[in-house]
Structures are given as structure tokens and as C-alpha cells.
Amino acid sequence: MRIIADRLRCVGAGQCSLVLPEIFDSDDEGLVVVIGEVTEADADGLRHAVRICPVGALSLRPDSSPAPGTPQAAGR
Ligand code: SF4
């Protein structure tokens, strides 16, 4: 799984870094930075962080999903 942090949406509330300080930190502007490797062992904490982010800036994706903004091949 991967955690996606939308820094354009983040308001620096810091809830995520309280839940998982080994994965989330904030930069000099107070916006979220993903600093740690995400493992399956973190799944429950990550889901909690996604739920409590007040602006919905965090999302979980399976490892196999493309990164946001990745062009997709057209289907036939
Ligand atoms: S909880 Fe959401 S708004 Fe707060 S720092 Fe984390 S990503 Fe940003």
C-alpha cells in the first residue's frame, strides 16, 4: 500500500503526525511530509490518519495503482 499526501490540500493541522510520527512530519510551513516507509503493519494507523485528516488530504492506494497524474493507456 502507498500513502498519498496532497500538500495542496493540507492545512497543517498535524493530526497525521500525532498518529504516526514515524511516517508523517511537517515541513517549515507546517505542511505534511511523508518521511517513512509504509508497511502492512501500519495499515490500521494509516486508515485512522486518513479518517481524521480534517481536509481529506490523505489517501491510501494499493501498491499496484498508478501515481496520481500518471497517464493511463487507452483501453480498447
Ligand atoms: S492531518 Fe491532514 S491537514 Fe493535518 S497535517 Fe496531516 S495531511 Fe495535513
Image: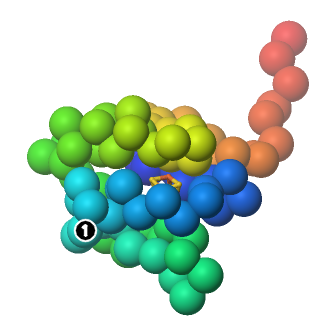
Residue at image position (24%, 55%) is: 19
Q: Quadrant of the N terminus?
A: top left
Give the residue at the far left of this rendering.
41
* Vertical arrangement, residue 39 with respect to residue 33, above or below: above
* Residue 14 in the image, given as x and y percentages of width and height: 41, 63
Determine whether, in the image, residue 24 is placed left or right of residue 26.
left
Residue at image position (61%, 57%) is: 10
Is label 1 in a helix, a strand or a loop? loop
Instruction: Report whether the residue tagged 1 is closer than 8 Å to ligand 1.
Output: no
| Residue 52 location, quadrant | top left
* Vertical arrangement, residue 23 with respect to residue 64, above or below: below
Of 33 and 53, nearer the camera is: 53
Of 70 and 61, nearer the camera is: 61
Residue at image position (59%, 42%) is: 55
Residue at image position (51%, 42%) is: 54
| Residue 8 location, quadrant | bottom right
Determine whether, in the image, residue 56 is placed left or right of residue 71.
left
Determine whether, in the image, residue 74 is placed left or right of residue 38.
right
Disc 1 designates what residue? 21
* Residue 17 in the image, given as x and y percentages of width and height: 33, 64
* Vertical arrangement, residue 28 with respect to residue 10, above or below: below
| Residue 7 location, quadrant | bottom right
Identify the amino acid type marked 1.
Pro
Q: Quadrant of the C terminus?
A: top right
Q: Residues within 10 Å of mark 1 (few under 14, many from 20)?
A: some
